[in-house]
Amino acid sequence: MPEATLTSTAPQSEPAIPTDEELFDRARQIGPTLVKRQAETETLTRYAEDTHRAFSEAGFYRMLIPKRFGGYECNLETYFKVVREIARNCPSTGWMLSQSINHTVTVGSFFSEEAQAAIFAEGNGEFRAPLTAKPEGTAEPTEDGGWKIYGTFHYNSGAPYSTHMMSHVIPTEMPDGSKPEPMLFIAPRHTYEILDDWGDVLGLKGSGSNSIRFDGGYIPGNYALPGQTFLTLDPKQAIGRNLHQNPMYAGSTLTFFLLGGANVATGTAMGAVDGYEDLLRTKQIPSPPFTPRTQDQDYQRWFGTAYGQIATAQAALDTYAREWIDLSARGAWTREQDLRLAGICREVVNNLCWNAVHTVIRTAGSSSIRNGQRMERVWRDYSQLYSHGWAFLHDVAARDLTRERVGAALAAGEWSPTFNEGAKV
């Protein structure tokens, strides 16, 4: 398949650091421009170049980068509110933006200072890297301690404008002769090919989730963490706590990843309620006496219920973000705490937001879910989110939370998504 050829528009100079309120204001200004461009975004299978430039100029790609490497280290709640506002207006764009920059925290937390300096410099102060969980390739060790990566990796959300790619491989052999285990790695843009193979899905067609192919792409040794996956990294061993003097770089990767997905899901559901409110104000009820929907008790109740569910989801996520930082600041992460927060994400995605979207779609009317209508698209987009592979982690985490509480061990051969306390990084 041909490579998707896109140009990086990263800024070449260090901009002034905006306040958290300025970042959110920029999201509120850009967000509404995305609603009418959703069809274009789906056709392109990514957000457009001028949207990419707008995000770059707004500083969104720098939000989570440490200040010592040219980033903003913005408040965590602000980061999630910015992405939520973008997803509210275009779920595909919100998912692509989120998955491009969400994993910056993993780099700042667990990779060496030397690796971080090189990685963030390669993006001219920006970092945009999709991450996939499944090891779909191999890595061959090189004589200088580096690795050559081979394989094709699927569902790389954010690939078109990426500066890097993060994923997992199985080494063909280990330099010390030990048994090869999954390895987390980061690869610069020049080491891989982006395939033009995204868009034939139900929803999130514009999320830029292209496949990426490696054919011997070289990475330095410190761009890899042998024996680790991004879900097994123990936050108590994060070097980012002392390196950056910021607890944002000393937290659980599982629950940060799940929070990112739940945040986009909440933004998507907010957009569904926005669209429903427009219908409420412009349409009549479909049966006698054909009064405006705003005057009908049933529509009032449906809208109020959905609105309240989304407000609850937002409150849960904002509290979650504050607790995530608090646990990191106190060095209080345990498996139980990690799995408990994962359960909050499960409730936000599978109950609060799903029920709100289901209510507004069920009562919007068939004329509002024709091809190209906002409500039709948001239904497809949320259905794609709801069935996404990351949602599987919710159920596994719920199972493991029970076992952690009652002291039951994993059965032989079973897998847990969270870190093993005390494991060596």
Image: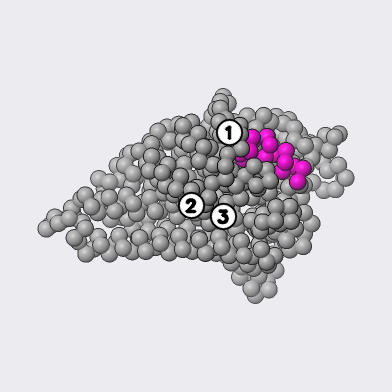
Q: Which mark is residue 75?
A: 3
Q: Within 10 angstroms of label 1, few (less than 14), some, or many (20 or more) residues?
A: some
User: To which residue does mark 2 refer?
Assistant: 21
Tell me where residue 57 appears, x and y as whole percent: 51, 37
Q: Is residue 344 above or below residue 53?
A: below
Between 135 and 244, the one lying in front of the other is 244
Q: Which-is-in-front pick, marks 3 and 2?
A: 2
Q: The magenta stretch spans which residues?
A: 113-127
Between 297 and 414, the one lying in front of the other is 297
Residue found 55% across the figure and 31% down from its top:
9
Main secondary-structure element of the magenta-colored stretch: helix
Q: Calculate the distance from the C-alpha at mark 3 to the C-alpha at mark 1.
A: 22 Å
Q: Is residue 146 above or below residue 301?
A: above
> What is the number of callouts on the image?
3
> In the current view of this chain or complex, which residue is farthest to the front?
16
Q: Earlier in the sequence, mark 3 or mark 2?
A: 2
Quadrant position of residue 309: bottom left
Tell me where residue 98 appears, x and y as whole percent: 53, 46
Type of amino acid at the residue the image marks with label 2 = Glu
Q: Within 10 angstroms of label 3, few (less than 14), some, or many (20 or more) residues?
A: some
Q: Earlier in the sequence, mark 3 or mark 1?
A: 1
Residue 244 in sight here = yes
User: Quadrant location of the N terminus?
Assistant: top right
Mark 1 touches mark 2? (CB < 8 Å): no
Between 93 and 63, the one lying in front of the other is 63
User: To which residue does mark 1 refer?
Assistant: 11
Q: Calculate the distance from the C-alpha at mark 1 to the C-alpha at mark 2.
A: 22 Å
Magenta-drawn stretch contains 121? yes
Question: At numbered mark 2, what does the secondary structure look like: helix, strand or loop?
Answer: helix
**Left or right of 139 in this view: 415:** left
